[in-house]
Image: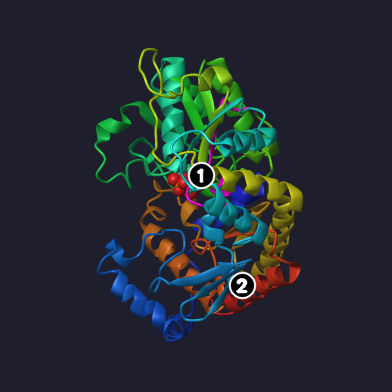
Amino acid sequence: MSMKYEEQKAKIENIVSQPLRKFKPEELKGIVERYGRNHKKSKEAFERARKILPKGVEHNLAFNFPFPLESKKVYGCWMETIDDIKLLDYLMCGGPIILGHNYKPHTDKIIDLIKEVGPCHGITHEYEYKAAEALQKHFPSCEMIRWLQTGTETDMLALRVARIFTNKKWVIKIGGSYHGWADQLVYDMHIPGTKRMESHGIPKEIYKWIDSCPPNDIEELRRMFKEKRRKVAAVIVEPMGGESGANPVRPEFNKEVEELCHENGALMISDEVVCAFRLHMGGGQAYFGYKPDLSVFGKIVGHGYPSAAALGGRADVMATVAGGVGGGAKKAYCGGTLAANPLTCAAAYWAIKYVEETNATEKAGRAGTRLSKGMNEVFEKYNLPWFSYNYNATVHFHTSCVFGIDITDPIQGPQIKERKEFMEHLGAALVDQEIISVAGSRFYTCMQHSDELVDRAIQGLDNICQKIE
Ligand SMILES: Cc1ncc(COP(=O)(O)O)c(C=O)c1O
């Protein structure tokens, strides 16, 4: 980690307690005009798409201001849009890519499999257990593994398994965390304390047995265990902190959660969807040093192929996961016509092998550290309160710092919209520099982000800072 937690917290408070630093109006106008001029084809494609796709866009991590871009192809650490603009890619598909896009040895294995084996069989294929073994090698806490298709449904299954195993109902999540979009977990997401703010269309009764704890507050979590008379089935965490560490974790917190869970007969669920093979080969649990009962995987385990995700955990806990047909014992029902198909399991198996072979996690982490350090130098040079930190290959840069808002504060609370809009402006300003980011506030690195390409991004940020009031 590039910056101490106390310093991260102080800097976030410093940003949200002062007025937002915005673009000079004429600079923003220029950015928007150039964006329109340079991406005419994307604009036309968007007009067509919005007639058939709600809002004209299905992906929510690349911001869409002033309108979404259309990608033509991706390779290495590049994305080419249909406008023939070559963007330096720090979106990395929202996290799954660490070897670089369309990494040839990986792609070749998939093509061979499609040609020679067939992508989907409907019964067990050797890649199913070979991929599980490859994953387990790095996650010894996962004595048994079940393949699924998305992080969202894997988090759903984790909750179901925990409730069956413990025979308890309460699940506590940490405020601001994202665990996919299943009904029960669309709660207190993004900005801690917002509770049901984003839960439209979900009856409030769904949250009868769900609660959230403010980030990093172990004493409050202890109090919640008491309040719920220890009827807590599980606590689920994002290891780096909410939103992949946009709300940074206090490094001891995960271990404290583990201990508290076990003192109270509850399970700890580690949502490793982003962390596995990005933060560390052994994910958040190896990086921060704790042992969860259940782990949730997604993203890099499929390395961009649709759709690999997995639940892993203690053998006795995982024994509650249903398999095959037939009822009887109390089991956590789960399914998926395409789950564990040879294509996604092969994608997982070979992704893990190539990450091991190339040292991709370490290389991408080094790029992240260089990027974060360089950005901080730029922010200091322009005397901005902005700052960056990285958890290896996940690099955050806080500018408007919407995630840090205290929604109970009468001055900060109403600023959510304006601070979010600024991130959109920043996303567009980065595209103006031919860089694509995650939501104008995060960069994911891969092993192909060389020093030169990192420095190019730093220079892009420098150019942007010159446009700030
Ligand atoms: C920590 C975490 N958990 C779960 C998910 C959901 O995974 P999926 O998008 O595969 O449903 C995400 C997705 O970004 C995530 O970051």
Position of residue 142 relative to residue 377, above or below, is above
The residue that disc 2 covers is 461
**Start-end of magenta stretch:** 291-308
Q: Residue at x 48, y 80 (%)?
A: 24
- Residue at image position (39%, 46%) is 408
Q: Main secondary structure of the magenta part?
A: loop
Q: Is residue 293 magenta?
A: yes
Q: Position of residue 377 (x, y in %)?
A: 70, 67
User: What amino acid does circle 2 point to?
Assistant: Leu
Residue at left offset 54%, top offset 54%: 115
Q: Position of residue 297 (x, y in %)?
A: 54, 40
- The amino acid type of the residue labelled 1 equals Ala
Query: Residue 308, which numbered label?
Result: 1
User: Quick one: 299 or 376, which is closer to the camera?
Assistant: 299
Residue 92 appearing in the image? yes
Q: Residue at x 67, y 57 (%)?
A: 105
How dense is the environment of label 2, judged by Cα within 10 Å: few (below 14), some, or many (20 and up)?
many
